[in-house]
Amino acid sequence: MSPRTDAASLFVPPFIVAAFVLAAYDRDRVFATVGPALLALWGMMILALAVRWVQALWIARRDPTRESSWLRLQVLTGAGRSMMWAGAAAIAVAAISGLASAAVLGVLGLASVAIAVTWTALVAGSDAPFRAAVIERAVLPEHAVEGDALREHVKVRGVRIPAGTRLFVTGRALRHGAASRYALGAEASRAEFELESELGLATRGDHHVPPLAWWLGDIFGLARGPIVYRGEASLTVLPVPCEIDGVKELLGRGGDAQLARPAQIMPTEGTFRIRDYLPGDDARRIHWVRSLQADRLIVRLPDEIPPAEPKVRVVLDSHLWGAELLSCVGVDHLLDALVRVWLGVGKELAAAGTRVTMVAAIDDGNGPRVVEKAIGPRALRDGLRLGARASWQATLPLPALLEARKVRNVVVSCRAPQRVGVHPDVTWIVVPEWCWHVDEPRFEVANALVLPHPIGSADNRYARRRAEYNRIAMMRRDRQLLAESIAAPVVRDPGVFVARPVRGRIALEGTS
């Protein structure tokens, strides 16, 4: 809620109560007795809030980066706001109908809120309880692999929790991960304690974990102090390359001069690849029978990628305008699938003897730039770290990542092949939706009498349920926008391959 809503709940109900109490002051003993007491409690509450507001205003003038002083008026919780308005309504009903029981309920509700707000403002109305606190937070394991189980570990020392209050902590380590929540009583004041919770499975990326939100609230849940953000952390989750089938087809025939054709052969015979002899070739590979037939030297090719393809650049196409603004889960799963296929292709090519360079646009804090890492069959670590840092970007188009020289470029993309100008030697691998499809979350309630959360949970409040509904609705709209932005037919071309999941692996199938 905004400070305006809290200010309205602090000032409007007391004026409504005052109007009805003055109207029935002479004919109702309850109002005549408790009227001055309610006025005194409300005055003490306003005085305590005014002191905290002036204190925050003075600090804000000395340090302009601090939060606005008006946030100090945001002290009521959802239960506190509801009790303020319910108490005012009960007193109005009592003044109109003369029901003494309604008046008692209204007086108890307003008095409870006034006492809770006054006490919370006095003992927890500033960030003083957290000034001497030492908070250390870590998401373990710090260098995780995609799919590992993550846990949050927080060490706290020196937090002052006044009597009559509780310490509340909440936060979300990963963008679409589980939220962690903690609550401690006054017995943990100035003590050293540790907090732990499970965060679910790790998702690929070089994550900056936002700080936790810390605040103090009264034991009845009616008022709270200002929110303090402490406990940042970092987390690197390495991707897991896919197992790829059909990678050799990406390089074609590899520049063979001739290809022997099968004929009538004996069981011990077979076919092999041959080409003309070049200076420097191993003389032991000369095929003398074929050489006599062709009247020139012919050599057998070794059973490996020939040196006609000395270098291959595997390029990750992460250029998608507006993708970083989408809130859906699918946009993250799409990039994860692209990175897995990209790394899998590089790994298989390196294992086959090709010199592989992994290319991606990486944001180092000053904007995206082209980063290249050479990998080998047993040196994939640099490629994994590069894949962990990959993110969507809208600055560097795909042609900026391709090599201008005559080098084979293998592009892993989620869109149909595009024209790349002066880079004709490009092989495309398209990762379609079925490789990364994921269902967005749903918000469904069976009927009006069934709550989505256990009874007593604060998440059952209408405001929170409405906010959650709007959040999920936006995610589903963004998911539709993502599908429309990448939907394009695959060109039927010999240089285009489509990645298809087959029995837990990815098979590359040509479209020609």
Image (cartoon, rainbow, N blue to C red):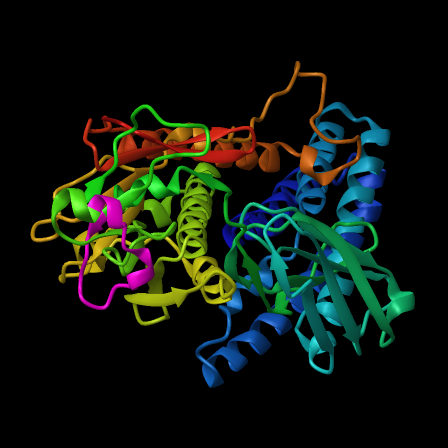
| Residue 270 percent location from the top left of the image | 38, 34
Identity of the residue drawn at 49% across and 33% down: 470
Q: Is residue 93 magenta?
A: no
**Is residue 79 or residue 332 the one in the foreground?**
332
**Is residue 109 or residue 214 the one in the foreground?**
214
Residue 95 position by quadrant: top right
Assign the C terminus to one quadrant of the image: top left
Q: Is residue 278 magenta?
A: yes
Figure disc tally: 0
Identity of the residue drawn at 50% across and 33% down: 472
**Is residue 42 or residue 281 the one in the foreground?**
281
Identity of the residue drawn at 60% across and 21% down: 444
| Residue 312 percent location from the top left of the image | 29, 57
Which residue is farthest bottom?
Answer: 62
Residue 121 visible at all: yes
Is 444 on the left or on the right of 42, as rendered? left
Residue 268 position by quadrant: top left
Residue 227 visible at all: no
Range of residues picked out in magenta: 275-290
| Residue 440 percent location from the top left of the image | 51, 30
Q: Is residue 138 above or below residue 399?
A: below
Q: Is residue 206 above or below residue 275?
A: below
**Is residue 332 or residue 35 the one in the foreground?**
332
